[in-house]
Amino acid sequence: MKNAIKTWAVCLSALMLLGVFAGCGKTEDTPEGLVILEEALAPEEYGIGFRKGDALCEQVNAALKVLKANGTAADIATKWFGSDITTIVADENALDGVAVEEGRTLILGLDDAFPPMGYRDGNNNIVGFDIDLAQAVCSYLGWELTLQPISWDAKEMELNSGNIDCIWNGMSLDEDRMAAMSCTEPYLANEQVLVVRADSGYSTLSDLSGKTIALQKESTAASALDAAESFKKSLANVRTFGNNLECLMDLEQGGVDAVLMDSVVASYYITTGSSDIS
């Protein structure tokens, strides 16, 4: 999976440079001096989280399989990534026997600064791959979709309090989240990678020994770092921020030496520029 993701990342960057990604091109604000280290820290998969035992999870999971089978998921992925990189298992009959709640509104909780999964465009509209995919699911099931921006470090509290129905925003699956929530099957592959300045001279994880890195608090980047004990011990300091954009801005300004984050977001930021995700 690791090699497949890296191959995709290279293609992703090339496609975005050609303007394939939803019409987005490079701007004068594009961070020309940031690169992703080839050596990833950990592979991951994205899934959607619901309250424990909520039947909505089964309904959405089945709908995704149908949308994969009829080509809708592929069309959405191609719009954002240039090709269908989803890992959804196609099944045109997945909804057979599933009791679908009629005429409901699905309240989707998201971090609205997480491109290309969900973020605000230049007109302050929330857009992204996950948004399009969620809208397609709701349209297929006859539901309405409501987007609810939340603080990512309070996502499970927002879910369990009933303020949102699901967490659908490039949420990496791990044991803790899968124990605390009902989660769909994975729909997209991802990696935790290190982003550094191109002129830093860093090319491997070991080069960051004694350095300071940044990551988004309450993200799986933190979990991946905890799991990589030797690498974490080699660091001088770890700084946390509210979102990945803040981490990258601090990196560009020289406040930290590297940012640990999702490869999907890192590739998008580096190739489209900060103005597209602010």
Image (tube, rainbow, N blue to C red):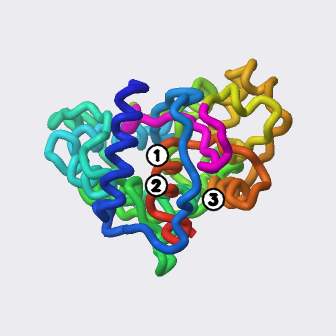
SS of the residue at dot 3?
A: helix
Q: Marks 2/3: CA distance?
A: 11 Å
Quadrant of the snapshot with the C terminus: bottom right
Disc 1 target residue: 264
> Is 204 rendered above or below residue 17?
above
Q: Residue 245 appears at what percent x and percent y?
A: 63, 59
Residue depicted at x 34% and y 39%:
8
Disc 3 target residue: 245
Which residue is the extreme one toward the right?
236
| Amino acid found under the numbered disc labelled 2 | Tyr
Residue 189 in magenta stretch: yes
SS of the residue at dot 2?
A: helix
SS of the residue at dot 1?
A: helix
Q: Which residues are magenta?
A: 186-203
Tell whether label 3 touches label 1 (CB within 8 Å).
no
Disc 2 target residue: 268
| Sequence order check, earlier mark of 1 and 3 | 3
